[in-house]
Image: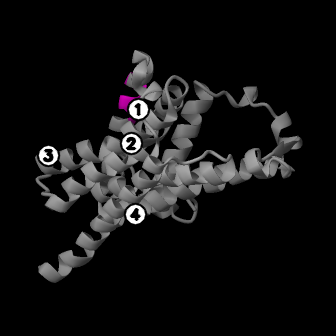
Amino acid sequence: MLLRHRHALPRGRPLAMLVAYGLVGFALLQWSLTEAIARIDVGVVLTLAYAASFPTALWCLLVRGERQPRVIWGAMLVALTGIVLALGLGGDALSALPLGGLAFAVAVCVLFAYYALHGEVLLRTTPTPVVLGVASIVAAVAWTLTAAPIWDFPTDVITEPVSLGGNLAEIELPGALVLGWSVLVGTALPYVLYLVGIGRVGPTRGVLQGTIEPVIAVVVAWLWIDQRLTPLQLIGCGIVFVAVAAVQMARVRAPSMA
């Protein structure tokens, strides 16, 4: 895709900003996320990550002078409440948080807000394939030279069959197929769709609507690895869906009110 749009590749300062986006919004964000979930409960990490809707909205208000409808602020609070319930946070999950893990989780929140805000700015002048292509290449090079050298990659994973685990443990697929699915469907496609989304609805609504992701993760975990949902978790899932629906309804009504 990048080759097809090579004529739109920016030069000078715009290219430098795109490279910075790849380093900070892709490589550093993924590194912080990995370090955070290695230290503390993934539910805490996801909750803090999607709290990024607050700094995103504040940046738009204080720096860009963009006012958000009251329903957006209310939906953010409601959605975060729903996520906390859906992920089953509380008790053991919050009793002894390592300071290092909490610091990385907060970094994820800040970097996620940056990812949405800077991404939306870049998309104003640069096509999505160029933004995604350059940023991905920069992030891949950064990871290869630092935390994940390609020469240390366990190549046996590609040739050996891999079990899907959980309720699908009896299903084994070629490692190359599982890896390719993870790269394309689990990484590349979400980045494309998210960048296109924030280019259309803005960074604040984009991050807020993304709060449905951890809820879907909870449901998939229930179906796939038989992780049972408590009544509070079910209520939390419903709350997040209501919050996202409220934002969508507010967006639909906005043009007719103008």
User: Which residue was labeled with disc 4?
Assistant: 197
Labels 1, 3: front one: 1
Residue 247 seen by the camera: yes
Q: Quickly name the residue at label 1.
A: 90
Which mark sits nearer the N-terminus, 2 or 4? 2
- Determine whether the residue tagged by mark 4 lies in a helix, strand or loop: helix
Q: State the residue position of label 2.
A: 84
Mark 3: which secondary structure?
A: loop
Sequence-earlier tag: 3 or 2: 3
Is 107 magenta? The answer is yes
Quote the CA–CA distance across marks 1 and 2: 8 Å
Segment colored magenta: 103-108
Front residue of 128/86: it is: 86
Mark 1 or mark 4, whichever is nearer to me: 1
Left or right for 199, reference 179: left
Q: CA distance from mark 2 to mark 4?
A: 25 Å
Location of mark 3 (residue): 63
